[in-house]
Image (cartoon, helix red, strand yellow):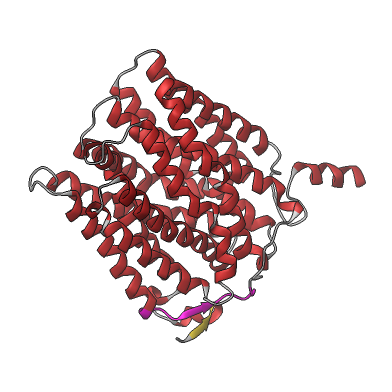
Amino acid sequence: MKIVRLEDALTLPFWRRPIGLLFMMALAMPIAFNTWSALLNNFVIEVAGFDGSDIGLLHTVREIPGFLAVGVIALIIFIREQVLGLVALVMLGVATGITAFFPSMTGILTLTMLSSIGFHYYETVNQSLQLQWIEKARAPQMIGWLMAAGSAVTFVAYVLIVMTWQAFDLSYAFVYMVSGGATVAIALFCLFAYPQFEAPHPQLKMFVLRRRYWLYYTLQFMAGARRQIFVVFAGFMMVEKFGFDVHEITSLYLLTLMTNIFVAPVIGRVVGVFGERRALLFEYAGLVLVFSAYGGVYFFGWGVAIAATLYVIDHIFFALALALKTYFQKIADPQDIAPTAAVAFTINHIAAVFLPVLLGLLWLVSPAAVFVLAAGMASVSFALALLIPRHPAKGHETVFQSRLEIAAE
């Protein structure tokens, strides 16, 4: 396979440049993963008879590969990051495609584990490649456009589900096979159609855990814990409490995607103009309010319209998480990006290994308490984000360095 340096890639046709590959991968992953997610709650409730405890166990299993994402460091010793990311996409697509053929608890958990390995290893490599291949000045807005592209292709997939699910009496097996197969086809095309791109800074192929990245690690941990509550229980609430059918829950997802298609690029521009500190503070403050309101759905019996509105707002706030990526890009040594991406994914998923199953048990007692806990986590994240300097850089990772430098002057 031909190796092309990043500076030489500008001579290639636009679609064969590194940014073209990033967009193709951004299109491929959501087709399988988001279709799987959209059908999951209905599939496990209707076909496998899952309750809140079971769904918590499933998501705990799903997050184990994220906890083991540090294994990417060992793999990139032997496999180029670009190849590893595309092979992981193939694995995600294949596992998604055959999900409905194994409707037992054991079968669902096994395929969830396999698809999750593909998803998390792809996401680890994808984040690393984005930060290596995109210049710092362009990173916030370009990552926003990549997010918008993923939302756009997911939007198309969900529209097809909404329009055809009842009209053609589609089965879970058919939809999973089509979505998984599409992801596999795009990944294989990328594997053979693109050259291997060489970044100017060779990546360390060893475990990297640096003290000066402590705030980034801590924010990643809190983000992972908080995200689990939304991913596991927000959609589950819509199905269990309000009885949403497949086409109804998918319609809700469509609304969030349509919003993100337009909002994500704007968020990228906002992060570029106002900085990571302000963007993350705004995100965490908004999430405190949203999760508190989720609890109000149970405490005060608020209706489906409020719950659905909160779901959409929640997605908008989570798009601001791209600021955490660009914060790290600004403070990192260039050669640390790949190994730290793997370490960060592992840290992000520490809580994911035990939190869903424990909160699944709490859900059986008090669903509102689950969301109140999430609001508390968002409050902790807000406090931590106050430690990000207005202009982060290497040696300037937190406000403590800023104060020390001012004192020294």
Q: Which of 203 and 52 is in front in this view?
A: 52
Residue visible at 44% across and 59% down in the picture: 117
Q: In which quarter of the image is the N terminus?
A: bottom left
Q: Residue at x 28, y 60 (%)?
A: 180
Residue 354, given in percent of the width and then of the height, sits at: 52, 40
Relative depth, front residue between 110 and 31: 110
| Residue 352 at x, y percent in the picture | 51, 43
Span highlighted in magenta in the image: 192-202
Residue 61 appears at what percent x and percent y? 44, 47
Q: Could you tell whether 289 is left or right of 406 in the image?
A: left
- In the figure, is residue 48 to the left or right of 299? left
Where residue 22 sits, quadrant-wise, is bottom left
Image vertical order of residue 25 relative to residue 143, above or below: below
238 lies left or right of 270: left
Residue for point 53% across, 54% down: 140
The answer to if 198 sits in the magenta stretch is yes
The answer to whether 199 is drawn above or below residue 250 in the figure is: below
